[in-house]
Amino acid sequence: MRVLLFGATGMVGRGVLRECLLDDRVTAVLAVGRSSTGVSHPKLRELPHGDLLDLTPVEGELGEYDACFFCLGVSAVGMAEQDYRRITYGFTLSVGETLARLSPRSAFVYVSGAGTNARGRAMWARVKGETENALLALPLEAYMFRPGFIQPMHGVRSRTRLYQAAYVVTRPLFPVLRRLVGGGVTTTEQIGRAMIAVAERGAGKRVLGPADINAL
């Protein structure tokens, strides 16, 4: 399969990129974003583009892909709702609507988060919930991934300093966390593998939590 990848320089995106490059089912990856991944691989091509609200200049490069893995996101900490919505909802729907027109019925996997709820009290949960609902209404095979605690694997790091510090502290406790919360914990490796599985054969439901991701 041919895969479009957004957010390849983030923690989840780097993990997903690694799994795509390792998996024989994926024949080509086009990583779209402002920054280079710094990765060189025969299957990988990078398309520099900074404004995801306007994909017109690169639209001709985005057609005929089997799946889109949308891993781009920001922390809501300290952000005004308008700014957070512009990135979380605006960027995502710009890509989703474009692909629905170019490659209808292709798979679109969106990384959301546990606790997402369009009617929730937390701002981030509402915005992500509205984003999920809008994606599910498009003529795409859209799947919402809602991971809980994500353990970075294989040298992958978070670009958010606070999160990276937390991962460093909790890394030795990961086996304990797995026993305590079970399916609430997943890894960047499992997320990447699950995305490929969903793109290849679908899933029994469109909204998948940590246990569903791990089962895939």
Image: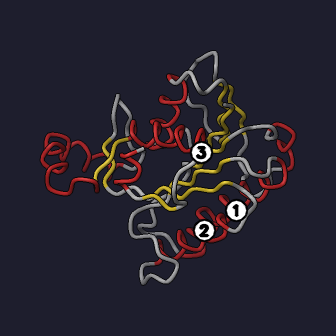
Mark 3 surroundings within 10 Å by alpha-carbon count, few (fewer than 14), some (14 through 19), many (20 or more): many
Mark 1 vs 3: CB contact within 8 A: no
**In the rendered structure, which amino acid carries the disc numbered 3?**
Phe
Tell me where residue 211 sits by quadrant.
Answer: bottom left
Q: Which residue is mark 2?
A: 131
Q: Residue furthest top?
A: 42
Residue 65 location (% of width, % of height): 74, 38
CA separation, marks 1 and 2?
7 Å
**In the rendered structure, which amino acid carries the disc numbered 2?**
Thr
Residue 44 location (% of width, % of height): 64, 24
The mark nearer the N terminus, 1 or 2, is: 1
Q: Is residue 25 above or below residue 115?
A: above
**In the rendered structure, which amino acid carries the disc numbered 1?**
Leu
Mark 1 vs 2: CB contact within 8 A: yes
- Per the image, label 2 sits on a secondary structure element best described as helix
Q: Which residue is mark 3?
A: 69
Q: Which residue is mark 1?
A: 93
Mark 2 vs 3: CB contact within 8 A: no
